[in-house]
Image (tube, rainbow, N blue to C red):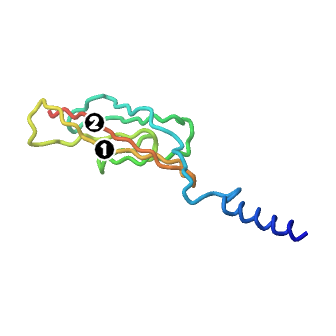
Amino acid sequence: MNRIFWLGIVMIALLEACNFGGESPETYYPPQTRIVRIDLTPDTVATKDTVLIHCVIEDSTDTQFKYSWGLGKDTLAVNGTVNGPYIKYIAPALSGQPKGTVIIISGGINIDNGSVDSLEVGGVINIPVLVK
């Protein structure tokens, strides 16, 4: 009987050491989606004009995803929201630049579905702006 008792204690200690049935603090949660592409309409925008930006993700039908656009204050809501897959951007005036040149304006996008185990996925947006 004494051996069975000690065998049970050893088994419990081993299971606890392996954290059997639990989560380790270093548990990795993979991103819930990935960015497939970022579309610009038109693909080059003139200064002070508006471009429609569409971020296409793998889970495009899941409405829980929130989009955080990093393009500054020159963004406009599409379909009543600035946290969706579409946004409009007003190209800056770019005064002092030679007419006819194309300047790349860069911004970012971060996407998260809000779940506890989700990792945010991000991307870079490059908008070609034609100086008028």
Q: Quadrant of residue 41?
A: top left
Residue 90 appears left or right of 22: left
Amino acid bearing label 1:
Gly
How far across and how far down the image is residue 30, in percent? Answer: 53, 45
Residue at far bottom of view: 2
The residue sitting at 37% across, 31% down in the picture is 39
Is residue 34 something that shows in the picture?
yes
Q: Is residue 123 above or below residue 27?
A: above
Q: Is residue 38 above or below residue 115?
A: above
Q: Is residue 115 above or below residue 56?
A: below
How far across and how far down the image is residue 129, in percent? Answer: 22, 35
Q: Which residue is mark 2?
A: 127
Q: Which residue is mark 1?
A: 107
The residue sitting at 17% across, 32% down in the picture is 102
Amino acid bearing label 2:
Ile
- For the residue labelled by badge 2, is the local secondary structure a helix, a strand or a loop? strand
Mark 2 neighbour class, 10 Å CA radius: few under 14, some 14 to 19, many 20 or more: many
How far across and how far down the image is residue 19, in percent? Answer: 67, 60
- For the residue labelled by badge 1, is the local secondary structure a helix, a strand or a loop? strand
Residue 71 appears left or right of 129: right
Asked whether 100 or 56 is in front, the reply is 56
Residue at far right of view: 1
Circle 2/circle 1 CB separation < 8 Å: yes
Residue 81 appears left or right of 43: right
Asked whether 3 or 31 is in front, the reply is 3
Q: Earlier in the sequence, mark 2 or mark 1?
A: 1
Quadrant of the image containing the C terminus? top left
